[in-house]
């Protein structure tokens, strides 16, 4: 079972996702079996942020002085999913999710779901530094997204 501790430092998130803890727990509930970790307790933290704050973190930890849609900080380099495991932190920028501003709530939610899945895979050790790794990660992302999308919106 995956447990997501959702923290919000940007009020605008509330306009688009009313019950943030329920929303993200629900995403995890509809993951494919492989990613549900049914007999384990897997924990992560999700910070719902904005461009200003994510830019600071991106500069501090990645030496990139610009905002980004998502940052993921795996707890360990090599993941071993024991019975109880904290896998890391994800930060998502509201400003990136809210483009274009006139998009429907459904499109906003779909973008957030895809981005969250992307961050989740980073916590599990996936990356996209090489083309082959990018293709592998994209394939898993799409598999998870297809499992979730019809059940959330």
Image (cartoon, rainbow, N blue to C red):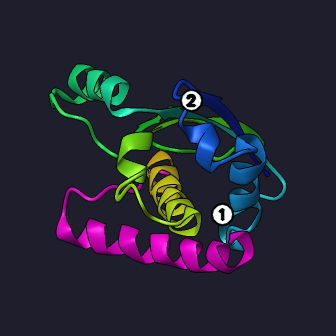
**Extreme right residue here?**
39
Quadrant for residue 127, please give it. bottom left
Q: Which residue is mark 1?
A: 35
Q: How many marks?
A: 2
Tell me if residue 137 is in the magenta stretch. yes
Taking the spot 19% from the left edge, 62% from the top edge, the residue there is 130
Q: Is residue 130 above or below residue 77?
A: below
Q: Which residue is mark 2?
A: 11
Q: Which residues are magenta?
A: 124-153
Taking the spot 35% from the left edge, 55% from the top edge, the residue there is 99
Left or right: 21, with 137 as reference point: right
Q: Is residue 76 above or below residue 82?
A: above
Residue 106, percent from left and from top: 58, 68
Measure how far apart labels 1 and 2 are at the Cα level: 30 Å
Left or right: 63, with 12 as reference point: left
Q: Is residue 62 above or below residue 70?
A: above
Q: Is tag 1's residue or tag 2's residue first in the polypeptide sequence? A: 2
| Residue 42 can be seen in this image | no
Residue 109, percent from left and from top: 57, 61
Left or right: 11, with 118 as reference point: right
Report the front residue among 123 and 51. 51
Magenta: main secondary structure equals helix
**Extreme front residue here?**
102
What SS does tag 2 mark?
loop
What SS does tag 1 mark?
helix
Task: Tell me the quarter of the image containing the C terminus.
Answer: bottom right
| Residue 67 can be seen in this image | yes
Quadrant for residue 39, please give it. bottom right
Labelled disc at residue 128: none
């Amino acid at each position: 079972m995956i447990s997501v501790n959702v923290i919000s430092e940007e009020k605008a998130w509330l306009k688009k996702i009313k019950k943030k803890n329920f929303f993200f727990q629900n995403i995890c509930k509809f993951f494919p079996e492989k990613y549900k970790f049914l007999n384990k307790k897997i924990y992560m933290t999700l910070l719902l942020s904005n461009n200003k704050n994510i830019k600071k973190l991106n500069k501090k930890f990645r030496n990139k002085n610009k905002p980004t849609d998502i940052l993921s900080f795996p707890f360990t380099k090599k993941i071993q999913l024991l019975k109880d495991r904290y896998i890391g932190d994800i930060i998502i920028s509201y400003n990136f999710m809210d483009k274009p501003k006139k998009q429907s709530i459904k499109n906003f939610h779909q973008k957030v779901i895809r981005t969250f899945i992307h961050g989740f895979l980073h916590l599990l050790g996936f990356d996209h530094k090489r083309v082959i790794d990018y293709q592998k990660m994209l394939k898993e992302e799409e598999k998870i997204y297809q499992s979730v999308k019809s059940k959330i919106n």
